[in-house]
Amino acid sequence: MKQYLVLAVGISLVGASVAPAQTTCRTGVPTAATVTKNTEQQAADFFQYMAPQISAAIAGGSPTLGQTSSLGGLGHISVGVHGTALAGSLPDVSKFPTCYTGAYSAQLETNSQVIPGAGADAAIGIFRGLPLALTNVGSVDLLLSATYLPSYDDNNVSLTEPDGSLKIGYGARVGLLSESIIVPGVSLTVMRRDLPTVDIAANSNATDSLFVTGLKMNTTSWRIEASKSLVLFGIFGGIGRDHYESTVSAVRASVVAGALGRTNTTLNPSPEQKLDRTDIFGGVKLNLLFFKLAAEVGRVSGGDVTTFNTFTGSEPGAARTYGSVGLRFGF
């Protein structure tokens, strides 16, 4: 579920700044100005590394999995739920080097990790379109989505949502061709999906703490999709572009380093990321009497992500493959 995804990433982001020392990056005399610089940079790079993966799990492929053609106007509705698994990677924060003498560019280890996502959505028919031979053109559907993120407080980590736990997404679908016995369905969709705003607080021990305020992840996607039902089964596919915007209002750390005592700092500037990627996907669906079962496989790629540190395995902007399964009900 998406809520567990955000929680896992939030905890990992916390770990990037307060993980116990594994290796010392270099010798030197720590000062109040340098003692937190390395952990700040690692936290910023962790954010840059994970944001594209989380955003891809949010956006997925088809905006309404299993329903790619327009609905046919007023009186028609389709509601669905889906789960997504992205073949990603997660930095191993327990092996991040600790340095109190300033930012130190290192190669940070990563491990393969499935990044999960889930959601609910609805499509509501608005306009049937204009008749043209064996199809209709110009039909319009309203699209809605919902993401719920519960609060969490356990193991010295708390997660709260200052603006509420529920986030509603929205969009529209225009039918370029309505599906019929002969004609495939072809549509253009635009969809906005976000996660609720999150505040995270964590303590790794009695001395070190991290506070992440105003974590936001927003996605805007457009898709051109085509589909054709073959009685019981159907096939569909599409291509589009995703725009990701990920920001944090503030990252504040409180660290105790030897004789320097406690040092409080705020990462400046706060991490942010804007990224455009190409999304290609295809899938199959099973048409039952009132329900549809659908599965898709897709791949996102493109865009540059710059980090101070480097990472083993996949680069921050690496192409990612994902798969989704869903269940729909409509009439």
Image (cartoon, rainbow, N blue to C red):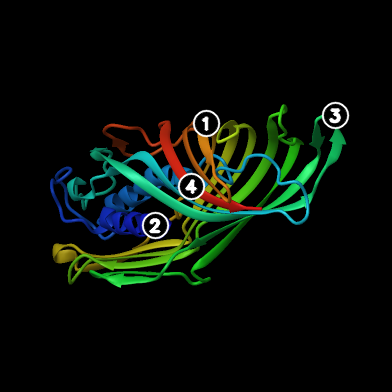
SS state under label 2: helix
Q: Amino acid at mark 4?
A: Gly
Disc 4 to disc 3, how far (Cα)? 33 Å
Q: Amino acid at mark 1?
A: Gly
Query: Does residue 210 appear left or right of residue 149 in this picture?
Result: left
Q: Is residue 20 visible?
A: yes
User: CB atoms at circles 2 and 3 under 8 Å apart?
Assistant: no
For this rendering, which residue is in front, 14 or 111?
Answer: 111
- Residue drawn 75% across the image and 46% down it: 72
User: CB atoms at circles 4 and 1 under 8 Å apart?
Assistant: no
Disc 2 to disc 4, how far (Cα)? 21 Å
Disc 1 to disc 2, how far (Cα)? 27 Å
Q: Is residue 15 above or below residue 154?
A: above
Disc 3 to disc 1, how far (Cα)? 28 Å
Q: Is residue 155 above or below residue 78?
A: below
- Residue drawn 74% across the image and 42% down it: 174
Q: Nearer the viewer, mark 4 or mark 1?
A: 4
Percent position of residue 207, x then y: 19, 69
Query: Does residue 254 appear left or right of residue 278 in this picture?
Result: left
Q: Which residue is mark 2?
A: 6
Q: Amino acid at mark 2?
A: Val
Q: Which residue is mark 1?
A: 282
Q: Residues within 10 Å of mark 4 (few under 14, many from 20)?
A: many
Q: Amino acid at mark 3?
A: Ala
